[in-house]
Image (spheres, rainbow, N blue to C red):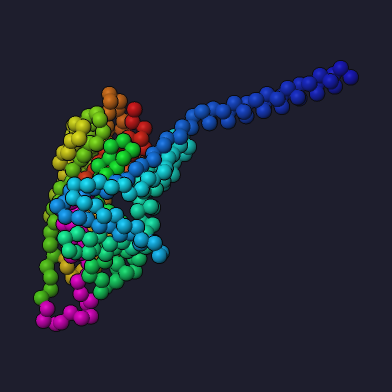
């Protein structure tokens, strides 16, 4: 009888110890996970001499934002966050949440200098061969964004409207079925825009970027020659430094499902296989392609911006 009771006691202790171990593991997992708040407040700015009016349409509702010269107005707040140690996924807050909100509207218009630019999220409309003026909804917002802490300022300026004019020029300007036989075929136009590195953080960044050469076929086709090598940069706070250039061709008679410049930029990013970063006396090294793509993601044409969003995403101390 004493042996039986002893066995019952030992079994109970094992179950209790097992339960205690499970609880300890759960506590350890919870303690290793840290919630990072990436809430972002969005503002619209006007650096021009005339009013800019942004109209956003969703169903029967119209959201109107009239921005006077040298004025700043509130747009919205993006509530987002992520958990450190909670696994890896394709969600990059607040960029993903911001993009989902900005592209959630059915259509939009931007009025400036007696001109009205039209935008839609209907891809079929944008890609229609007779479309000569309607752009994607994400282009209704300025390409220049300045982030200060939790606040992001999108500025309407001359560069933005020059960008819109280029994008409209890239749309199909004629249905191929309507082109007359004596029409002179438009020629390819070669573009060589610069790529810049921008430091919006409060401390310097040292970069060591290793890249491969381009395939010979690409170099010959685009006359874009680039040998394997290492680039070194030191970015002071609020500094903008030239990184490289990309090369692409456009033709006014062609309609592009993907902007040629985007393909060239992706090719540039893909050529990098190792990036070392020194920030606040801490060194970080990236060799994974997904990390490098995120690190070199261009927030606008063609600026690679290092800001609080990227710092938090990569966990720089």
Percent of width and height locating residue 193:
15, 51
In the image, residue 167 above or below residue 130: above
Rendering quarter of residue 108? bottom left
Magenta-tinted stretch: 154-183
| Residue under the image location 31 percent in, 47 percent down | 74
> Does residue 163 belong to the magenta stretch?
yes
User: What is the tally of numbered marks visible in this picture?
Assistant: 0
* Residue 144 visible: no
Percent of width and height locating residue 165:
17, 61
Q: Which of 222 and 62 is in front in this view?
A: 62
Q: Nearer the viewer, residue 203 or 73?
A: 73
Rendering quarter of residue 178? bottom left
**Outermost residue to the right:** 1
In the image, residue 207 above or below residue 217: above
Percent of width and height locating residue 210:
23, 38
In the image, residue 61 above or below residue 144: below
In the image, residue 190 above or below residue 275: below
| Residue under the image location 86 percent in, 17 percent down | 2
* Residue 254 visible: yes
| Residue under the image location 12 percent in, 62 percent down | 189
Residue 61 shown left or right of residue 50 in the figure: right
> Does residue 295 belong to the magenta stretch?
no
| Residue under the image location 22 percent in, 36 percent down | 199
Percent of width and height locating residue 23:
62, 28
Q: Quadrant of the C terminus?
A: top left
Q: Quadrant of the N terminus?
A: top right
**Outermost residue to the bottom:** 181
């Amino acid at each position: 009888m004493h042996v039986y009771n002893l066995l019952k006691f030992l079994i109970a202790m094992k179950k209790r110890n097992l339960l205690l171990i499970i609880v300890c593991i759960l506590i350890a997992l919870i303690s290793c996970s840290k919630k990072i708040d990436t809430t972002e407040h969005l503002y619209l700015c006007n650096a021009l001499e005339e009013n800019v009016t942004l109209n956003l349409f969703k169903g029967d509702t119209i959201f109107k934002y009239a921005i006077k010269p040298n004025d700043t107005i509130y747009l919205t707040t993006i509530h987002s966050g992520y958990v450190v140690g909670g696994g890896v996924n394709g969600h990059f807050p607040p960029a993903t949440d911001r993009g989902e909100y900005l592209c959630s509207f059915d259509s939009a218009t931007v009025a400036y200098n007696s001109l009205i630019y039209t935008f839609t999220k209907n891809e079929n409309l944008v890609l229609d061969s007779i479309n000569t003026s309607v752009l994607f909804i994400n282009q209704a917002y300025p390409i220049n964004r300045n982030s200060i802490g939790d606040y992001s300022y999108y500025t309407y300026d001359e560069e933005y409207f020059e960008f819109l004019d280029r994008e409209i020029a890239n749309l199909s300007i004629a249905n191929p079925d309507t082109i007359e036989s004596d029409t002179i075929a438009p020629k390819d136009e070669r573009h060589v825009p610069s790529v810049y590195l921008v430091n919006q953080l409060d401390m310097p960044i040292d970069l060591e970027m290793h890249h491969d050469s381009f395939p010979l076929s690409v170099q010959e086709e685009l006359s874009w020659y680039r040998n394997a090598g290492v680039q070194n940069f030191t970015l002071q706070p609020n500094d903008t430094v030239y990184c490289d250039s990309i090369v692409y061709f456009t033709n006014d008679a062609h309609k592009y499902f993907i902007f040629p410049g985007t393909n060239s930029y992706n090719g540039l990013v893909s050529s990098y296989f190792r990036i070392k970063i020194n920030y606040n006396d801490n060194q970080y090294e990236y060799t994974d392609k997904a990390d490098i793509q995120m690190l070199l993601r261009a927030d606008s044409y063609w600026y690679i911006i290092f800001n609080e969003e990227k710092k938090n995403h990569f966990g720089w101390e």
